[in-house]
Amino acid sequence: MKRRTFTLGLGALFAAPLMPAPAVAAVPTAVTEKFAAAKLLARCHDRASPEMLGRLMRVDGETARGLFKLLQDRGVLQNGLDGVARAANPLNTHCVPNEAIRARNLAQQVAQTREKVRDIWNKVQEHTAEPETTLDAAENEMSELADTEIETEEVPSETDTAS
């Protein structure tokens, strides 16, 4: 029998309770209870911070930070280019833009304009490509018709006209 592995396993069994286990961070119930309201606030305002959540929801700073972290972990909030946590799927996209979302609207307009320009450019390319082929085909048909007309045309001779 393998005595060494048996004694190592036996020692590990008794030593395991003495070792510190990694702390499993359980989300406090106050945070999970208020998550839906915090998500709605973040999506309505298109941004969030722990201070804003604490002020609007009337919760203490620790709960507000927990809510903010949970919103980031679940993908409701994303860090924007300007350092402000913004909603991934905001609700106020049809409102009059304010200073907070003006940059995002500008970026969306630039992207939409770029797509429109690409579509127009593709249509122009297709349109300019078609006449070249149709012109070539028309020239070929005209030359074929001209050749057949010349071959079939009879020139009256002088003897035919005299009689």
Image (tube, grey):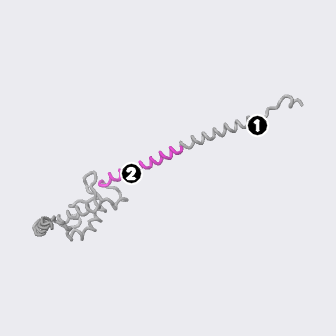
As shown in the figure, which amino acid type bears the numbered disc 2?
Gln
Secondary structure of the residue carrying tag 1 is: helix
Q: Amino acid at mark 1?
A: Thr
User: Magenta stretch mostly in which secondary structure?
Assistant: helix
Q: Which label was assigned to residue 152?
A: 1
The C terminus lies in quadrant: top right
Position of the N terminus by quadrant: bottom left
**Labels 1 and 2 touching (C-beta < 8 A):** no
Give percent across and percent down for residue 130.
Answer: 56, 44
| Kind of element beneath mark 2 | helix
Q: Mark 2 — residue?
A: 109
Q: Which residues are magenta?
A: 99-127
Q: Is residue 63 left or right of residue 112?
A: left
Q: In the rendered image, which quarter is residue 38 located in?
A: bottom left
- Position of 1 relative to 130 (above/below): below
* Disc 1 residue crowd, few under 14, some 14–19, many 20+, Cα 10 Å: few
Is 65 situated left or right of 111 in this image? left
Cα gap from disc 1 to disc 2, whole angstroms = 64 Å
Q: In which image quadrant can residue 154 be found?
A: top right
Image position, residue 55 (x, y; %): 21, 64
Q: Residue at x 60, y 39 (%)?
A: 136
Q: Please check the rendered image and state whether residue 125 is part of the magenta-colored stretch, yes or no.
A: yes
Q: Is residue 4 above or below residue 103?
A: below
Q: Residue furthest top?
A: 158
The answer to whether 14 appears left or right of 145 in the picture is left
Q: Which residue is nearer to you in this view: 51 or 140? A: 140
In the displayed structure, 155 sits above or below 87; it is above
Query: Which is more foreground, mark 1 or mark 2?
Result: 1
Q: Nearer the viewer, residue 161 or 50?
A: 161
Q: Position of residue 143 (x, y in %)?
A: 67, 36
- 110 vs 52, left or right, is right
Q: Residues within 10 Å of mark 2 (few under 14, many from 20)?
A: few
